[in-house]
Image (cartoon, helix red, strand yellow):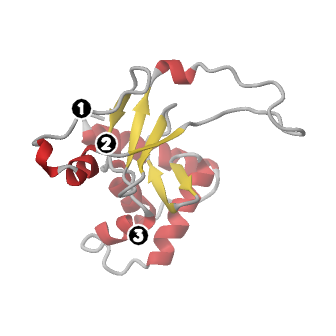
Amino acid sequence: MSDVPSYINSKLVRLEASCRAHGMPLTVQRRVVMETLAGRRDHPTADQIFEALGTRLPGISRTTVYRVLEAFVALGVIQKISNPEAKAHFDADTSRHHHVRCRECGAVADVHDEGLNSLRLPAHAAPGFDLVDYSINFVGTCATCRLAADPGSGSPPSPAKAGGARVRQ
């Protein structure tokens, strides 16, 4: 996502096509929510997106933001990163990747590792289920929280590696 404007534009093009295919109007609210989410790398919660929209769409309600995000998940144009211990986070990147969540502050980051993407799905994981996909959610402590816990260390330790995984915050 090094070229943010072109990434945002590609997400808007995909959103427009998905809305058209499902007979859903592409409203100003939907467009601005997608622009806001696609422009962020921190996997924001619905509340964080709502707060970020304050100056661009001052009349938008928190409920509208939640509904728009859930509609995007249903369309498959964003991912919802759920965790029973925290609020759901949202990710505009729908490519195959995984996540790590800080157990202290709740920050979420992407984990890109081809080895994780090629795991074989178990044939009989649970009775009655046919598995079609998976995602892995790691839990750890981010560099900021590690540094806060040990301020005398001078600098944050190197990022955690999961079998050579690249972690992007």
Q: Which residue is drawn at 37% across and 64% down?
A: 49
| Percent of width and height locating residue 97 | 48, 32
- In the visual, does 38 lie left or right of 82? left
Judging by the rendered image, the residue that carries numbered circle 1 is: 158
Q: Residue at x 32, y 71 (%)?
A: 51
Q: Which residue is identified by label 2?
A: 169
Q: For the view shown, which residue lies furthest in the right direction?
A: 128
Q: Nearer the viewer, residue 144 or 37?
A: 144
- Res. 25 visible in picture: no
Looking at the image, is mark 1 or mark 3 earlier in the sequence? Answer: 3
Q: Which of marks 2 and 1 is in front?
A: 1
In the rendered image, the vertical position of residue 2 relative to residue 100, given as above or below: above
**Horizontal and vertical percent for residue 73?**
57, 53
How far separated are the C-alphas under marks 2 and 1?
14 Å
Residue 78, x across and y down, in percent: 50, 48
Rendering quarter of residue 55: bottom left
**Label 3 SS:** helix
Q: Nearer the viewer, residue 1 or 125?
A: 125
Rendered-image quadrant of the C terminus: top left
Spatial CA distance of label 1 from label 3 is: 31 Å
Which amino acid does the dot numbered 1 rest on?
Ser
Q: Where does label 3 land, which residue?
A: 47
Q: Do the residues labelled 2 and 1 touch (CB within 8 Å)?
A: no
Instruction: Compare marks 2 and 1 and give the one earlier in the sequence.
Output: 1
| Vertical comparison of 72 with 58: above or below | above
Q: Which of 46 and 13 is in front in this view?
A: 46
